[in-house]
Image (cartoon, grey):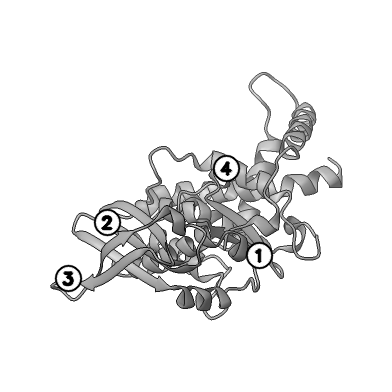
Amino acid sequence: MNNQVAQQQKPTKLTDLVLDRVKQMQDTQDLSLPKNYNASNALNAAFLELQKVQDRNHRPALEVCSHDSIVKSLLDMTLQGLSPAKDQCYFIVYGNELQMQRSYFGTVAAVKRLDGVKKVRAEVVHEDDVFAIGANEDMELIVKQFIPKFENQDKPIIGAFAMIKTDEGTDFTVMTKKEINQSWAQTRQKNNKVQQNFSQEMAKRTVLNRAAKMFINTSDDSDLLTGAINDTTSNEYDDERRDVTPVEDEKQSTDELLEGFQKSQEAKAKGVSNNGNSNENKEEASEEVADGQTELFNEGTIKPADEADN
């Protein structure tokens, strides 16, 4: 197999080892994925997207990003049950780090996975809309009234709020436009055009991220899920911890996982198939399959970097 094909196959090994790790977590750490979520399909969609992700110097992400950051990004995506095919997440390069970030749709999907959550929603408040807040008997913030008006849709945004409805009640989070702007100023992507061109969706995403963080930190859900959601939220901000290495509980570094995967592939190559094919014939067949996969992978498309949500 030539070097070019070997280099193109490398990311597929990364997705395979992430899938293997997810299966181990399902067996040993009670990881539960959404009922209709296919981790393998999501990882394949992510691989297609990664083919065209570039850094600011237009260098391919798969060439400049560390294996650890690629694996962690794919693992965080899978643990949250997200897929780039549904516009729930996207990938961004920071230096030699790859990071997965959620869109507004992705945050809604992730929070809905938490125990007891019935409904998740965020809305923006425009100038001259009717909006009133208050407090309940437990001194918890509530939205008492919200009446949006069609004629105000093109007026300036003055704030946003998020609602998380659970079996025990409804939690509200409210942010003024000044607070939203302050949050945007702390992100790693400064002067982002998406925040200006798609301010409504971006404002909803920001307030929902804050609501999700406050709700998650008081929940009893799986540490695997809540940890992945919190990490994804925090890794895009300059003032929060960003760890792109696999957590210690996984007990295996990315290099060890890669080495184990490589050994298993080599062991398979040494054997003989049931129909009597030799190792040489199997290697030739593998190369043909690899070439075919490469052609399919190269057909993938993604959104331009400046269209990514923040």
Dot 3: what SS? loop
Could you say where residue 228 lies in the image, as x and y percent from the top left? 46, 61
- How packed mark 3 is, by other alpha carbons closer than 10 Å (few <14, some 14-19, many 20 or more), is few
Q: Residue at x 38, y 39 (%)?
A: 35
Quarter in which the N terminus is drawn: top right
**Disc number for residue 193:** 1
Quadrant location, the C terminus: bottom right
Please identify, in this view, whether the residue under mark 1 or under mark 2 is nearer the observer: 1
Splitting the image into 4 quarters, where does residue 190 fall?
bottom right
Q: List the residue tagged with mark 4.
A: 85
First along the sequence among labels 1 and 2: 2
Q: Is residue 78 above or below residue 99?
A: above
Q: Which residue is mark 2?
A: 165
Callout 4 secondary element: helix
Looking at this rendering, what residue extends furthest in the bottom direction?
239
Q: Residue furthest top?
A: 275
**Mark 3 near mark 1, Cβ–Cβ under 8 Å?**
no
> Could you tell me residue 89's position as x and y percent?
55, 53
Per the model, the C-alpha gap separating discs 4 and 2 is 27 Å
The answer to whether residue 299 is left or right of residue 147 is right
Identified at 76% across, 28% down, the residue is: 285
Of circles 2 and 3, the one toward us is 3
**Mark 3–mark 4 distance (CA, rounded to whole Å):** 41 Å
- Mark 1 Cα-neighbour bin, 10 Å: few <14, some 14–19, many ≥20: some
- 143 or 89: which is nearer to us? 143
Identify the element where label 1 is drawn.
helix
In the rendered image, residue 170, in percent from the top left (x then y), is placed at: 24, 60
Q: Would residue 251 be seen by someone viewing this image from the given angle?
A: no
